[in-house]
């Protein structure tokens, strides 16, 4: 049992490697804009493309993984995620860059629902949210490290510095392959044990859809910050590209640390309660940021927003899996995948708002969505854990 519980750390490390690439793309946008003279909407379309490629197929991968054992889909996903991102620095044509980020997105789609399902299988009712928080912490830590890698390697070696993004994927793949047989056995044993139990449980689709409204709006806010936070710091506060990306890493780091505590707090105080509190604090902070002229205060406020948003992340995944106990892979695919699609699509919308009006107006839109997110959390249905 102890060996199974330790899988959450391996999956968390894999999540770290996978999500490095997603945040790195946001950090690469100022370099693409400077090198290829993209407008905001064109640059944001790269974020949209990778998230569309990733997120639209994640629910399908999740549904498929509910039915079949796919143990080696995880290392394949990692290699595609890192490989696609690595190639972006060696290509100048916009459409080929678009193809590369889509390949990276497909890799992320293969990884997320399968890894989240394994974490669920290796957990129990008392520690499920905590286990998911460790898994989520890996992803958020990857988001924090991605911009730093861009600042260090692309900042010093030019666009070809993106080659660094394949290295973590190779190392994690080798580590995963050592555990492959055990993971396959765990999946097989769990599905046999759970078949009778889950047949007595009913999916609550209505509650799940209400949760999706909350998660989707949260994703729009998160991806709005991911895509335009660095650009905002450059344009409004006059930071360099490298300094702005370090600040973006601080933003993600605050979220990563918060995620680590979110699961344990949810296990103790309740999933829905923690989601409500965290999002209710985040929304007014986003609005407040629009009126801050001090760079230092803006950075502190943004880190608080990141922490509050991320505090709800693990509980929302655990809640989705409880709403759909017979379709854990699908629930994971939607919460980790389709939600990102929505965020990615609206990243382009936010970019268009910035092009037509101003960068500040784009953050007005983000603030409005954050209020919708907070309000929607009050319609979530508490559920007993199994």
Image: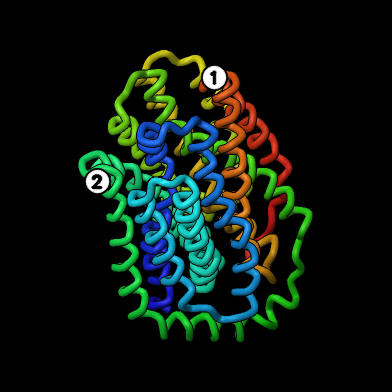
Q: Which residue is mark 2?
A: 153
Decide: is 110 above or below 380. below
Residue farthest along the left direction in this orientation: 156
Q: Is residue 99 visible?
A: yes
- Can you say whether 239 is above or below 144 in the image? above
Disc number for residue 358 = 1
Q: Position of residue 176 (x, y in %)?
A: 36, 74
In what element is the residue under mark 1?
loop
Looking at the image, tell me whether mark 2 or mark 1 is earlier in sequence order: 2
Does 214 appear above or below 164? Answer: above
Taking the image as shown, residue 137 lies to the left or right of residue 62, namely: left
User: Furthest-front residue in view?
Assistant: 93
Residue 119, percent from left and from top: 49, 68
98 vs 115: above or below? above
- Using the numbered discs, state the Cα–Cα distance from disc 2 to disc 1 in whole angstroms: 31 Å
Q: Residue at x 46, y 52 (%)?
A: 96
């Amino acid at each position: 049992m102890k060996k199974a519980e330790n899988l959450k750390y391996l999956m968390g490390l894999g999540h770290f490697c996978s999500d490095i690439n997603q945040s790195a793309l946001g950090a690469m946008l100022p370099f693409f804009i400077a090198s290829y003279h993209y407008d905001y909407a064109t640059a944001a379309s790269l974020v949209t493309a990778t998230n569309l490629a990733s997120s639209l197929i994640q629910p399908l991968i999740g549904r498929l993984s509910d039915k079949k054992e796919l143990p080696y889909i995880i290392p394949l996903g990692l290699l595609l995620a890192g490989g696609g991102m690595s190639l972006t620095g060696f290509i100048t044509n916009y459409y080929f860059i678009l193809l590369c980020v889509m390949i990276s997105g497909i890799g992320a789609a293969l990884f997320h629902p399968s890894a989240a399902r394994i974490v669920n299988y290796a957990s129990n009712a008392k520690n499920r949210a905590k286990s998911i928080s460790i898994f989520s912490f890996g992803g958020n830590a990857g988001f924090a490290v991605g911009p730093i890698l861009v600042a260090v390697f692309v900042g010093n070696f030019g666009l070809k510095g993106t080659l660094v993004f394949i290295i973590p994927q190779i190392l994690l793949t080798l580590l995963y392959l050592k555990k492959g047989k055990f993971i396959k056995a765990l999946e097989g044993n769990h599905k046999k044990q759970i078949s009778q139990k889950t047949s007595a449980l009913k999916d609550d689709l209505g509650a799940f859809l209400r949760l999706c409204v909350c998660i989707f709006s949260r994703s729009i806010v998160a991806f709005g910050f991911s895509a335009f936070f660095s650009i905002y710091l450059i344009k409004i506060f006059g930071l360099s590209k490298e300094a702005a990306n370090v600040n973006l890493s601080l933003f993600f780091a605050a979220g990563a640390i918060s995620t680590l505590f979110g699961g344990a707090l949810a296990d103790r105080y309740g999933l829905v309660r923690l989601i409500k509190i965290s999002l209710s604090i985040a929304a007014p902070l986003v609005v407040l940021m629009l009126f801050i002229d001090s760079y230092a205060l803006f950075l502190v406020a943004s880190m608080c927003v990141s922490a509050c948003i991320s505090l709800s992340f693990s509980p929302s995944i655990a809640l989705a899996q409880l709403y759909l106990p017979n379709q854990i892979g699908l629930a994971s695919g939607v919460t980790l995948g389709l939600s990102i699609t929505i965020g990615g699509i609206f990243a382009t919308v936010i970019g268009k708002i910035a092009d037509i009006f101003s960068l500040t107006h784009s953050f007005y839109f983000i603030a409005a969505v954050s209020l919708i997110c907070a309000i929607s959390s009050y319609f979530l249905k508490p559920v007993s854990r199994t």
